[in-house]
Image: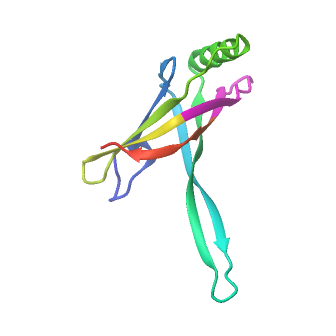
């Protein structure tokens, strides 16, 4: 719920959809996404430089406090399929945001590939946090 007219992190919900189905992550702690841009510059001899920018996909990551084997099972199945020579499909991430005025905005990251960067550190008196990164071709507005 927004606070004092500002969006806070808990105003968003993320659904990770893979070629094998939806990953249900009840303990998603954080989500970060960055738009990538390819920048180029034309340097004419007779005028000022001309700057060009081209969309170049998205990069991101998320952190999950491990509550079950969901991520471990998914990535074990991905690894087994890849080693067996299977064609691994891409997925999508759906971001739903409750806006300050009560409306809803929804965006979809397309052609998503996810990677388990850190399966977690196991230590006494500490939760296990798993780190996942992703790449996406684009982010489009759905709603």
Q: Quadrant of the N terminus?
A: top left
Question: Along the horizontal axis of the image, is 106 left or right of 135?
Answer: left
Q: Determine whether 138 is above or below 66 in the image.
A: below
Q: Is 32 placed above or below 125 here? A: below
Residue range (magenta): 112-132
Q: Residue at x 52, y 32 (%)?
A: 28
Q: Residue shown at 47%/22% (left/top)?
A: 24
Tag count: 0
Q: Nearer the viewer, residue 89 or 22?
A: 89
Report the residue at 37% width, 57% height from top: 6
Q: Residue at x 34, y 58 (%)?
A: 4
x and y percent of residue 114 in the render?
A: 61, 31
104 falls in the magenta region:
no
x, y percent for residue 14: 44, 35
Most distant residue in the left direction: 102
The image position of residue 20, as x and y in percent, is 51, 17
Instruction: Give the image location of residue 123, x and y in percent.
Output: 75, 24
Would residue 54 be visible to someone looking at this image?
yes
Residue 125 location, quadrant: top right
* 27 sits to left or right of 100: right
> Which of 99 and 143 lies nearest the eye of the viewer?
143
Quadrant that contains the C terminus: top left
Colouring = rainbow
User: Observer-nearest residue: 69 or 45?
Assistant: 45
Is residue 130 visible in this depiction of the protein? no
Q: Quadrant of residue 70?
A: top right
Q: Where 40 falls versus 109 (above or below)?
A: below
């Amino acid at each position: 719920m927004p606070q004092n007219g500002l969006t806070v992190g808990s105003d968003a919900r993320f659904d990770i959809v893979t070629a094998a189905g939806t990953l249900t992550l009840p303990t998603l702690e954080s989500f970060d996404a960055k738009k990538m841009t390819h920048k180029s510059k034309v340097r004419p001899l007779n005028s000022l430089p001309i700057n060009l920018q081209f969309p170049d996909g998205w990069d991101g990551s998320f952190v999950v406090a491990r509550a079950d084997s969901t991520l471990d099972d998914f990535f074990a199945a991905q690894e087994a399929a890849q080693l067996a020579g299977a064609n691994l499909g891409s997925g999508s991430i759906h971001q739903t945001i409750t806006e300050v005025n009560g409306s809803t905005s929804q965006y979809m990251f397309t052609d998503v590939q996810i990677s388990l960067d850190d399966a977690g550190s196991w230590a006494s008196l500490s939760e296990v946090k798993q780190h996942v990164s992703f790449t996406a071709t684009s982010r489009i507005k759905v709603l």
